[in-house]
Amino acid sequence: MVSIFFSTSILAQQSGSIDVVKESRQILQMAEYIGVDYSEAVTNGEIANEDEFAEMQQFASLILQKSATLQTANKADFDLRQTSVVANARALQQAILEKYTIEKIQVLTQQIRQQLLALSPALLLPTQLLAQSQVQTLFADNCAACHGSTGEGNGPLAKSFSPSPTNFTETKRALNRSLLGLYDAISAGLEDTAMRAFTELNDQQRWSLAFYAGSLAFSQDTNQHKQTDKKTVPKIALQSWINNNPAQLANDHGELTLDQITQWRAIPEFFFSQADSPIATTKTNLIAAVAAYRDGNLSQAQTLAVSAYLDGFELIENNLDARDSVLRKSVENQLLNFRNVLDVASNDALVVKELQHILQQLELVDNTLTGEVLSNNAMFSASLIILLREGLEALLVVLALITVLIKTKRQDAIRYVHVGWISALVAGGFTWWAAENIIDISGSSRELMEGGAALLAAGILFYVGYWMHSKTKATQWQQYIQNNVERHLSTGTLWGLTGLAFISVYREVFETILFYQSLLTQAVGDGSQSSYVWYGLVAAVAIIMLITWGMLKYSLKLPIGRFFAISSYFMLALAFVLAGKGVSALQEAAVIPIATFPFDITVRWLGISATWQGVLTQGVIMIFVVIMLACRDKKTSTTS
């Protein structure tokens, strides 16, 4: 499996970016350190510890110096908010000199951290931690000598250090310490202290230690809650959970109590029960794609970029659409266009720039999906739309086949159509089950199947539409039907109807199941919200049944000539839609390249996408339709 942890080494190799990342992270670390340890330096406006007070002054001076340097050297990379970072750094330095209260100092350090976090590149977060026993062994081997076996800061070497090693079990300190700060301290050390950088540990080990150290102050109070609280993952984006300390999280999320947050902090695995979530999968594969690109393996980079979209983001598109359709469309376009960037070798700066932009957008997606729970009505609507959007095309094809057979007096052949669509439902369900339990069906394979099936169905429907149109004006249509339908609907042709019904339905079933599965993961509560997903599904089925009844009732009442005319236009329209969707699916699977159209003409329900390939394909169909109609009208005029 590809690496699942972000490393700033991707940025470190970009000239001009390494200083921004490294220096800003050091400022974050020092600001947090002041907010945590200032109370040991100053108490009631008086210096409590001269060494600690000197250290606070030194760190404040470094924060101001580094902030000013970043502002001067990286104006192109930082917006005007950077000015306020310098202003707050200067205010912090003055506040320490004047021995302000810890509360005022923490306000300033928190403001500095929030400003810098808003300006910093997006961080790909861990998607899995080491097992608890492995983390405890790591802590014992690397941390216990200074911090003690239980993290109380009383290890055998502790007395020889000044300042003393951190006591991770001290609740007041832990409430003001972020997991990002702990991770950075482990990764880069802390200047002017005995805390060294543990560069020999990999990212997973460092993140695991950070989460473990951050849990030690709260474990004793929350053991009794582990079984009950573990049922619900907190609705806080993992990025926010890592960037902010518990006190800040409680302040930012008024619906949560500090007790709840500390309970979750005590049990790191809370945030990793969904390690293979679509967003995590997307980020993981994007980072791996860039790593492959930097190694010169453009083919592997393309494969991973394709998987980032199809095995990750695509599965939550419906959920995101219900909240922010503009954001969904933006991220979708970025992910698809990112492949074009990866096609060009030796373009590292642009690749990393695009990666960071996409990661930042994915953080917005994560915040959108986790920060606000879908309402019951939104859950119902999303469920309804999924089935209607995915199933309506297949339904229309099947109904068209049935009505044609009825109008041509071949009701005995309808069973072949029923065999086709029922088999597709069974096969789709089995395919999903096999993908979950036996084999690994990639998103690329799924789109390849759907795209191929859509184009095949489009070709057949176009032919059928053309054939039906050619019969709408025939004066001897009844004789034609009597003389030819029986002969042409041989056993082989009838099984062909089965095949078309199967293809039309199967191409939708597997993906529809995945979309519902993803939607159900967004349901919260005691299960009552999940019921709205099923209500939406039942409502969609009811609407589909109503459409079925209406089409069968009213189409059968039409005169045969008009029926053929309407049905022919209907078939040609379906061919147009399916051709566009087939091209889009093959583009998503990276079988067909993506050339962006000059302006956005996307109409998803018509299969129209803003790519030259899709526009040209559907344009060719339109040209053939126009020619067909013109020729038919000319023939009719001549006959008259």
Image (cartoon, rainbow, N blue to C red):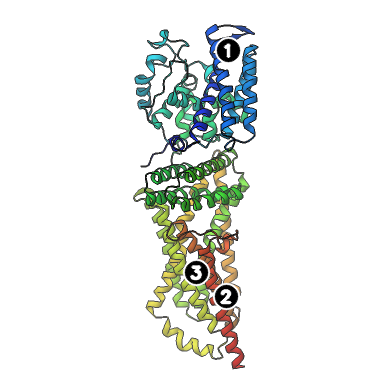
> Is disc 2 placed on a helix, strand or loop?
helix
* Quarter of the rendering containing residue 546: bottom right
Disc 3 marks which amino acid? Val
Q: Rounded to the nearest whole Å, what is the CA distance between mark 1 and mark 2?
A: 78 Å
Of circles 3 and 1, the one toward us is 1
Residue 569's mark? Answer: 2
Residue 594 in the image: state x and y as whole percent. 49, 58
Disc 2 marks which amino acid? Tyr
Residue 398's mark? Answer: 3
Residues packed near mark 3 inside 10 Å, few (<14), some (14 to 19) or many (20 plus):
many
**Tags 3 and 2 touching, CB below 8 Å:** no
- Res 533 visible: no
Q: Residue at the location (46% across, 63% down)?
A: 505
Q: Rounded to the nearest whole Å, what is the CA distance between mark 3 and mark 2?
A: 16 Å
First of labels 3, 2 by sequence position: 3
Residue 390 in the image: state x and y as whole percent. 52, 59
The one nearer the camera, 353 or 590, is: 353
On screen, 335 above or below 66? Answer: below
Q: Rounded to the nearest whole Å, what is the CA distance between mark 3 and mark 1?
A: 74 Å
On screen, 276 above or below 71? Answer: below
On screen, 43 above or below 292? Answer: above
Q: Residue at the location (53% across, 88% down)?
A: 478
Of circles 3 and 2, the one toward us is 2
> Is disc 3 placed on a helix, strand or loop?
helix
The one nearer the camera, 148 or 532, is: 148
* Quarter of the rendering containing residue 210: top left
